[in-house]
Amino acid sequence: MSLGPVFRVAFFIALRDTVRGNRWASALTILLITLTFVNLVIVGGVLVGLIESSSLANRVRHSSDILLSTPASKSYIEQSAAIISLIERTDGVVKYSARYAEPATITAGYKTKLNPKDVEDYARAVVAGIDPVRENDLTGIAEKVVEGRFLKPNEFGAIVLGSNLLYKYIPIDSPGLQTLDIKGVGEKVRLTVGGNNKELTVVGIIKSKVGEIDQRMFMNGAELRPLIRRNDLNVDEIAVQVTDDAAIASVKAALIAGGAGKFARIQTWEEAQPKFIQDIKNTFAILGNIIGSVGVVASSITIFIIVFVSAIVRRKQIGILKAIGINSNAIELAYAMQSVFYGIVGITLGMVISFLVIKPYVDLHPINFPFSDGIIATTWPSTIARIVALFAATLFAGYIPAKLIVRKNTIDAILGR
Amino acid sequence: MALIQAEQLTKKYQDGETVITALGGVSLSIEHGEFVAITGRSGSGKSTLFHQLGLIDNPTSGSLMVDGTDALRLTEKQKTGFRLKHIGYIFQDFALIPTLTALENVVLPLLMAGVPHAKANEIAAATLASVGLEGRGKHLPSELSGGQQQRVSIARAISHNPALILADEPTANLDHESSIRIMGIFKALRDRGITVVMITHENEYAKMTDRVITLFDGVIEKEERN
């Protein structure tokens, strides 16, 4: 028997069976495949997206595309002025922001303390000295002020605190975690840095869900500089934004070639991420795949049962088809074609729901997790892998039961034995 | 040479430790263009014999030649192909595919035989017309009466010009008028040289054939020419 008639008859039967057959069973199978696909994409995407969004937020709000920081053996980036000049001259650089960053202690309630022996209300964190205009232009940090306002240019005596430094944002009582128990904006606090004290007014609180930001304090660089005795204008961090992703490697290479690498650690935004972020991302991706795989298996079994029940119910019909001379390969192929149809429709609907409904919605309204604004992270290779896995499972689950029934003796099939 | 030549066909079933003999050694010969009825009471073995002659079940022993082919040497797939070329089946309950229209039910074996779709449609429409169903081709089986469904079943069986038509109780589910019409079609097929073997338990219709073979307890009790 040549393949032509087998294929033609299989298509003939499959098409009409799909169009005129049990629509509920067809709808149920398609719905199942659709939901499995959505589950595969969304669950995995949310798990990875949790970390991905955290990672992206760190890039936007803190490191920008390239981060130059103080080498471990130094106290600051030496030759900062020359390096900044090099940055300004390098092709592909769009903007940058230089920061002072020093460990400091901030104390509150010292004026109202009745007994000098009472424990002070203090917190330790890095204080960042910035140019407010340049920093906000680079990172948009002012958007993340949740109380009060951001620093004004050349504003002295003002400080903006990261939300993690305040008890009201991190209400955890732990000896290892010191937070300020203050109301927030308008409070006077004492900054101790480099052995100097300075009284400042809290003008704003920042909550960005980026650890590096929420754990810091921000004040004008010009005011911080004398406190840390940095009269040589050397800074601790320089965040650099470049034209596009393709320029990251070339700008980094140009900075290294220009000699900046001798005085600063130069990292791309990915390299500047804490390693655990990438580890968590990988772990969540595996977790997403495991959950997705369980979904595929569960879906395959259900499709298998639906097709098997359908084939059992039509056992007599299959026997009759064989009795009138229809090749068993054509009958099996007809079931396989129906599975292919269900797979295509189910996966297409799943893609529409996932990529035209859920993902755009979540992009506009990120899921509010405590440590990130959750997005759905998907890539085409991972989506294609999921499509192939689900399609193969659907085909397998549809074909095997048909094969089992068709293999039965013709008379047994006709008589339902 | 006879179209069907069966020698000592037996069929035994195992039911626990009991062996049930459905056919106890049936030998028969049916010629080309003959119209034969196989009758007998319920449990006489006529359906079992019918299944053996139609190559949809395997005998326990014996030999069976159909249209010059040793049918018992064929594999399952070869038997399916053989049925497509040489045998047309008509079932008691019509056995039409419910998701196919009358025309499509008739077209199906033609497509399997490699006939181009347009030509198959043409042949199927002409065959339906020959059994009095012109204009009914687009109806689904559920939209047809029992008699009409049986005629679609006959059209499907004869559309690819088989040498042998096997009909299992074709009038059992039909009223008298429809049954007479079906018998008329079978006679016309016989007149065209097609062999028709019909299982029936109704004497009235058995008498309309050329020869009646009566089975009793799995063996041929008698043969009569009409």
Image (cartoon, coloured by chain):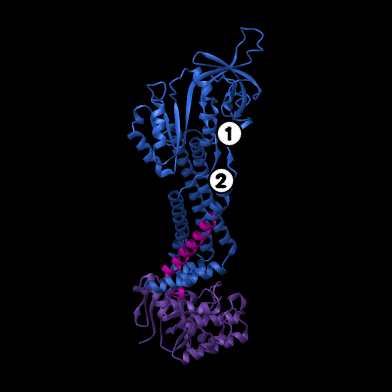
Residue A272 relative to residue B70: left or right: right
Residue A298 location in percent, x, y? 51, 50
Q: Quadrant of residue A2?
A: bottom left
Identify the amino acid type marked 1.
Answer: Ala
Query: Between A168 and B62, which is closer to the camera in this rendering?
Result: A168
- The residue that mark 2 highlights is A363
Q: Quadrant of residue A132?
A: top right
The part of the chain drawn in magenta is A323-350
Residue A318 vs B83, above or below: the answer is: above
The residue at the point 47 percent across, 43 percent down is A290
- State which tag comes first along the sequence, 2 or 1: 1
- The residue that mark 1 highlights is A142
The blue-coloured chain is labelled A
Magenta residues: mostly which secondary structure? Answer: helix
Residue A329 vs A124, above or below: the answer is: below
**Residue A168 tag number:** none
Query: Between B182 and A144, which is closer to the camera in this rendering?
Result: A144
Asked if one can make out residue B165 in the rendered structure from this viewpoint, the answer is no
Q: Quadrant of residue B30?
A: bottom left
Mark 2 neighbour class, 10 Å CA radius: few under 14, some 14 to 19, many 20 or more: some
Secondary element at tag 2:
helix
User: Which of the chains bears the disc numbered 1?
Assistant: A
Query: Between A168 and A238, which is closer to the camera in this rendering?
Result: A238
Mark 1 neighbour class, 10 Å CA radius: few under 14, some 14 to 19, many 20 or more: many
Queried whether the magenta region covers residue B77, the answer comes back as no
The residue at the point 38 percent across, 77 percent down is B8
Residue A284 location in percent, x, y? 48, 39
Residue B57 vs B174, above or below: the answer is: above
The colour with which the image depicts chain B is purple
Q: Measure how far apart labels 2 and 1 are at the Cα level.
A: 21 Å
Residue A135 location in percent, x, y? 52, 32
